[in-house]
Image (cartoon, helix red, strand yellow):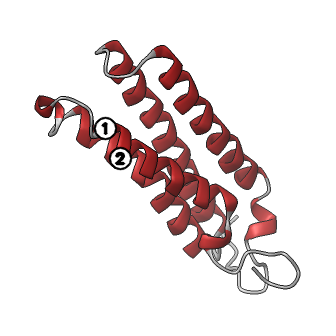
Amino acid sequence: MSRLGHAESFRDLVVYKNARKFAKSIFELTKSFPKEEMYSLTDQVRRSSRSIGAQIAEAWAKRRYKKHFISKLTDADGEQQETQHWIETAEDCRYLSPEQTQKLNSALSEIGRMINSMINKADIFCDKRFSVTDD
């Protein structure tokens, strides 16, 4: 972080840190899923949870173009919602308890709120000094 408190990298963003922490918790949790789910549900939930942070990192790289920045953040939000779906599917299969599902989806919803806040405040993140007009 800079002296002024501004992020110098996507790694400085709290939402990115939360997304990585969440993806790690999904990885650990899915180790207990049945072996027959390895190439289906386990892969899907791991992939979508990991993609949240990746999309945030890509959005950071595209800050030069506000529309691209927003588009990548929208993709990140889509990934967090897809992850909620897979978590609920895991609960339906009785791999997760309702309490685990609620806790995980609550964390994802918070990540979603942070992503949407970034979308709504895109001008703050998109440095106008280097920006290419794309409106």
> Helix, strand or loop at disc 2?
helix
Q: Indicate whether 50 appears above or below 33.
A: below
- Tell me how far mark 1 sits from mark 2, CA to CA: 5 Å
Query: Label 2: which residue?
Result: 27
Quarter of the view holding residue 123: bottom right
Q: Indicate whether 61 appears above or below 123.
A: below
> Helix, strand or loop at disc 1?
helix
Evaluate if marks 1 and 2 touch, with contact meaning CB atoms under 8 Å apart: yes
Numbered-mark total: 2
Which residue sits at x=71%, y=86%? 130
Question: Depth check: 12 or 124 in front?
Answer: 12
Residue 4 left/right relative to 107: right
Which residue sits at x=43%, y=35%? 82
Which numbered disc covers residue 132?
none
Residue 114 left/right relative to 36: right
Question: Depth check: 112 or 65 in front?
Answer: 112
Quarter of the view holding residue 105: top right
Q: Indicate whether 134 appears above or below 93.
A: below
Query: Label 1: which residue?
Result: 30
Tell me the kind of residue under disc 2: Phe
Tell me the kind of residue under disc 1: Thr
Q: Position of residue 111 (x, y in %)?
A: 63, 44
Q: Residues within 10 Å of mark 1 (few under 14, many from 20)?
A: many
Q: Indicate whether 38 appears above or below 64.
A: above
Which quadrant of the figure contains the C terminus? bottom right
Which residue sits at x=56%, y=75%? 61
Question: Depth check: 91 or 99 in front?
Answer: 99
Residue 90 left/right relative to 88: left
Q: Position of residue 94 (x, y in %)?
A: 32, 15
Q: Position of residue 133 (x, y in %)?
A: 70, 74
Q: Position of residue 53 (x, y in %)?
A: 50, 58
Question: Depth check: 20 or 118 in front?
Answer: 20
